[in-house]
Image: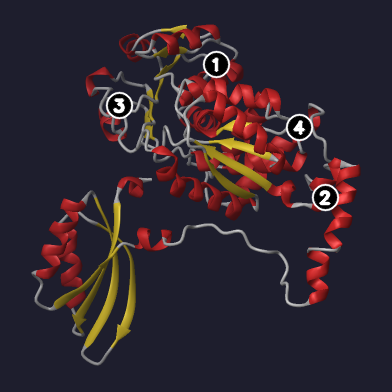
Amino acid sequence: MWWEDKLVRTLRCRLLQKPGIFGGLLTLIGKEQVYVGEIKIIHMGLNYMIRDITIYVDDEEHLQRVVRAVQSYEQAELLEIRDEVLEMHQGGKIAVRSRYEINNISVLRKVYTPGVAEVSLLIKKNPLLARRFTSIRHLVAIVTDGSAVLGLGDIGPLAAMPVMEGKASLMETLTGLSAIPILINTKDPDKIVETVINISPTFSAIQLEDISAPRCFEIEKRIQEQVDIPVMHDDQHGTAVVVTAALMNISREVSCDLKKCRIGVVGLGAAGLALSRMLMFFLEKPIYGADINPEARERLKKEGGVVSDLKEIMSTCEVVIATTGVPGLIKKEMVRPGQIILALSNPNPEIEPELAKEAGAVFAADGKVINNLLGFPGIFRGAVDANVPRITREMLLAAARAIADYAPAGDIVPNPLDKGLHRQVAKAVARVALEQKLNRDDLTGYFD
């Protein structure tokens, strides 16, 4: 979305209560090329009105230009500049709360000693009962070492916590799963693998998040081999699912048969390699890939892809997907008429969609439109509900189809905040689990 790389601030202003005064203020703000969001009336007096005006600016310098413009307006007084993002993060965004109000001795004895001992003994006799009598059934770990966070890079696990909390908040809001951030203060793959394996009995699934390539490939593989719950690195498979879903709809929109198109992926890190794997599985043909790292190119080759370079991909491929993290890598003159260009690096894409379209691209989009939030909540909900030991390629492809099918006519992806979308994705994943006989929980009535 266009606002994802903007600073959000709220200007609290007191204005004279006269016609045209507020309009004049908005005109001044608009001249500074500012997007205006929500406007609230805080207080309405006889002669004055206090309003909160939410604005989206490029950076602090842009904000100061707006502030100076507002301060120059004699009919208004700037009372306060509020950062609602920081306010929202005060004390964190998630919490663990009791499902029961413990307000008398009778309840206390049931939820804790002596009553709890009976439940513990039942689970000791039959460990499978833990899913019935504990929160394990709906707990998901979100694990990171903070080495590849958003477009911020290696900022460490502590600085990654607000992002992990955000993922957890979204998981609970959209699907009801309780996600717990796990910060691991090491980049050593052996220690990360050992830590996650040791804590895995607490959870029904493991979401690996913001772990840099190439370590992420080994870490995911080794953990999944040693635990019997699903493990998914969202930066790999979540991205692959959502981009595949978008391509399904784009191809229909522009009447392009993906099986007949030559597809190139520029950037073979976590997202690029996983996307290449998924497209090769989906389309049953090789994908062309480019990367400056020889090890990344070799990984693609081992997966059945064709090693290429940026020049060849731009000159020969009908579909180009870039996940390099290099702003402006694709120049306008490289784009050929009729190409589909997805420049997915955030916050700054390899080429702005508008420039690609001006150069003749039949369709162009960036990473602000194609968001992982479309995929991971429903994928985990379906995997956890079916109690599968792992998430298969077929489940991921089913999730991509569910996302594509849920998009309204004319849109390439649905609204990521639509809970109905995530229910459909969960059902698609669970249905494949049933078909593959990987479900360990009864799914009778699940698809009604």
Q: Position of residue 22 (x, y in %)?
A: 21, 75
Residue under label 3: 326
Q: What amino acid does circle 4 point to?
A: Ala
Q: Earlier in the sequence, mark 2 or mark 4?
A: 2
Q: Are marks 3 and 2 in contact (CB under 8 Å)?
A: no
Q: Is residue 14 left or right of residue 232?
A: left
- Tag nearer the camera, 2 or 4: 2
Which residue is painted at 89% across and 42% down in the image? 126
- Tag nearer the camera, 3 or 2: 2
Q: Position of residue 208 (x, y in %)?
A: 55, 34
Kindly report the distance in space between the C-alpha atoms of the residues bearing marks 1 and 4. Answer: 26 Å
Q: What amino acid does circle 2 point to?
A: Arg
Q: Earlier in the sequence, mark 3 or mark 4?
A: 3
Report crowding for label 1: few under 14, some 14 to 19, many 20 or more residues within 10 A (C-alpha).
few
Per the image, label 2 sits on a secondary structure element best described as helix
Q: Earlier in the sequence, mark 3 or mark 1?
A: 1
Q: What amino acid does circle 1 point to?
A: Lys
**Quadrant of the rendered image containing residue 84:** bottom left
Residue under label 4: 433
Q: Earlier in the sequence, mark 1 or mark 4?
A: 1
Residue 126 against residue 319 in the figure, above or below = below
Q: Earlier in the sequence, mark 3 or mark 2?
A: 2
Q: Which mark is residue 259?
A: 1
Which residue is painted at 49% across and 25% down in the image? 188
Quadrant for the N terminus in the image: top left
Residue under label 2: 132
Kindly report the distance in space between the C-alpha atoms of the residues bearing marks 3 and 2. Answer: 48 Å
